[in-house]
Image (spheres, rainbow, N blue to C red):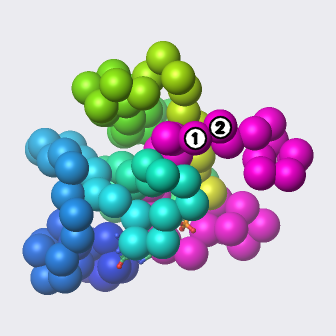
C-alpha cells in the first residue's frame, strides 16, 4: 500500500488544514506555502506521478483542476486569478510521490520565468 505523507493525511494519521474532501479527493493547505493561498488537491486513487496516469483515468486530473477552480470561485479570488501546478519527478521538483495539484493565489504571481514568477 502506498504510504506517502499525503496517504497519512487522507487516513487522518497526521493533521492537516483540510479545506475540502469528497469521495474522489482531499484538499488541504500546504505546510510551506509559496503564496498567500497554497492548497494541495490530492486524489484518493494512487498514482505516484503524472506519468502513471493513463488516458482512461484522465477524469482524475480533470476533477482536481475543476475542484481547484470551484474553490477559487467560492473563496472569491477566481476573477483576480490563480495558478495550478503539477510537478513531475526530479526536474519538475516533485517531492511527494502521490500525484497532487497545487493551487497558488492571493497575490500577483508574475509570469513564468520572471522574478517572482
Ligand atoms: P511537490 O514538491 O511534490 O510538488 O509538492 C509537495 C508539497 O507538499 C510541498 O509543497 C510541501 O510543502 C508539501 N508538504 C510536504 N509535507 C507536508 C505535510 O506534512 N503537510 C502538508 N500540509 N504539506 C506538506
**Image point (75%, 39%), residue name:** 110
Q: How many marks?
A: 2
Q: Residues within 10 Å of mark 2 (few under 14, many from 20)?
A: some
Residue 8 in picture, x, y percent from top left:
22, 78
| 28 on left or right of 57 | left
Q: Quadrant of ligand 1?
A: bottom left
- In the image, is residue 78 above or below residue 106? above
- In the image, is residue 31 above or below residue 80? below
- Principal secondary structure, stretch drawn in magenta: loop
| 103 on left or right of 94 | left
**Image point (88%, 46%), residue name:** 114
Q: Secondary structure at mark 2?
A: loop
| 99 on left or right of 29 | right
Tag 2 near tag 1, CB within 8 Å = yes
Residue 51 in picture, x, y percent from top left:
60, 54
Q: Which residue is mark 2?
A: 108
Q: Secondary structure at mark 1?
A: loop
Q: Which residue is mark 1?
A: 107
Pick whichever, 113 or 22, lies toward us: 113
Specify whether residue 56 is painted magenta: no
Pick whichever, 84 or 46, lies toward us: 84
| 40 on left or right of 14 | right
Query: Quadrant where the N terminus lies?
Result: bottom left
Q: Which residues are magenta?
A: 88-117
Amino acid at each position: 500500500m502506498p504510504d506517502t505523507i499525503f496517504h497519512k493525511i487522507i487516513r487522518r494519521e497526521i493533521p492537516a488544514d483540510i479545506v475540502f474532501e469528497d469521495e474522489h479527493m482531499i484538499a488541504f493547505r500546504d505546510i510551506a506555502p509559496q503564496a498567500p493561498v497554497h492548497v494541495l488537491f490530492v486524489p484518493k486513487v494512487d498514482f505516484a506521478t503524472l506519468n502513471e496516469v493513463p488516458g482512461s483515468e484522465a477524469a482524475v486530473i480533470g476533477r482536481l483542476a475543476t475542484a481547484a477552480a470551484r474553490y477559487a470561485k467560492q473563496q472569491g479570488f477566481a476573477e483576480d486569478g490563480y495558478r495550478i501546478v503539477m510537478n513531475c519527478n526530479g526536474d519538475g521538483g516533485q517531492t511527494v510521490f502521490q500525484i497532487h495539484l497545487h493551487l497558488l493565489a492571493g497575490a500577483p504571481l508574475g509570469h513564468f520565468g520572471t522574478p517572482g514568477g
